[in-house]
Amino acid sequence: MKKSIVSMFYAVVLMLAFMLGGCGGEKKEAAPAATAEQPAAGGIWEQSTLNKILKSGVLRVGMEAGYMPFELKNKNGEIVGFDVEIAKMMAEDMGVKLELVNTAWDGIIPALLTDKFDIIMSGMTITPQRNLQVNFCDPYIVVGQTIFIKKDLEGKVKSYADLNDPKYTVATKLGVTADYASKKFMGKANIRLFETEQEGAMEVLNGKADAFVYDLPYNAIFFAQNKDKLVFLDSPFTFEPLAWAIRKGDPDFSNFLNNYLAQIKGDGRYQAAYDKWFGSTDWLADIQ
């Protein structure tokens, strides 16, 4: 009897061991390996521009130092402006050095794509065409195209529509959204394109053009300096959000930048920089 009980006991133990072993085998399935379509999260981070910035200890920012008041040169030849101030904040919060890379506007996107710098922070308007080449972060400011005209056209030209006439000469900068807007809305006019904003604006001031088309911030400042010779049509006729541009395929850097923008807008630092560069012209005394 005892032998039968012992035999039954061992049989039950063996059965339980077999069952437990089978369950354990089912739980030890290997996690699916990363594929080309679904790369490992670690691999994405290793390739992220943000990771490379932290490793190198340098944030490289591409900009064209000629878009007042976003980026321009002071009397010492240093690049200053609203975008520069935000870039300095960012580098400091990252714990890295800031390197400003002054780049001609027509080559600024190719320079980003060939890793000449990490990010474009240069008053760049989001457009579908640009967005096919780069990724944009959330807009950090919204501007639009405005116009200032010669003083003797006051009352004769009241909007962009009045300039859509062959008798008028319209100046603007080559390759920017003002260029496209001028051709779209004032295509009948004689449109003259210049390498810099300053050159185009001076054409009107010197009487060689009837109107200058450009972004609201620049035109407002230029007009404030030359009120006796110009008339400012300050209602924007386009909607243009400006944003930072980065290379495609970098979710970690994009996530950081969007959150960073929200943070500085929330803690007041963005507003302080905005008030300094857009709410005052005190900085003009230090400009070339």
Image: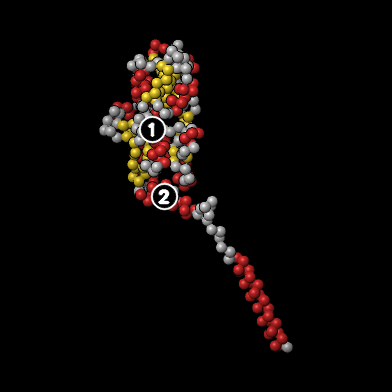
The vertical placement of 158 against 281, above or below, is: above
Colouring method of the image: secondary structure
- Taking the spot 49% from the left edge, 27% from the top edge, the residue there is 239
Q: Secondary structure at mark 1?
A: helix
Identified at 54% across, 51% down, the residue is 37
Q: CA distance from mark 1 to mark 2?
A: 27 Å
Residue 272: x %, y % from top left: 39, 34
Name the kind of residue labelled 1 in the image. Trp
Q: Position of residue 156 (x, y in %)?
A: 45, 11
Question: Looking at the rendering, in which quadrant would you find the N terminus?
Answer: bottom right
Q: Which residue is the site of mark 2?
A: 51
Q: Secondary structure at mark 2?
A: helix
The one of 42 and 280 positioned closer to us in this rendering: 42
- Seen in the picture, residue 105 relative to 226 is either above or below; the reply is below
Which quarter of the image is occupied by the C terminus? top left
Which residue is at 30% across, 28% downward? 287
- Viewer-side residue, 158 vs 286: 158
Q: Is residue 202 above or below residue 72?
A: above
Query: Are circles 1 and 2 on residues that touch, CB within 8 Å?
Result: no
The kind of residue tagged 2 is: Asn
1 or 2: tag closer to the N-terminus? 2
- The residue where tag 1 is placed is 105
Could one spot residue 89 in this view of the protein?
no
Closer to the camera: disc 1 or disc 2? 1
Figure quadrant of residue 280: top left
Question: Residue at left 45%, top 22%?
Answer: 182
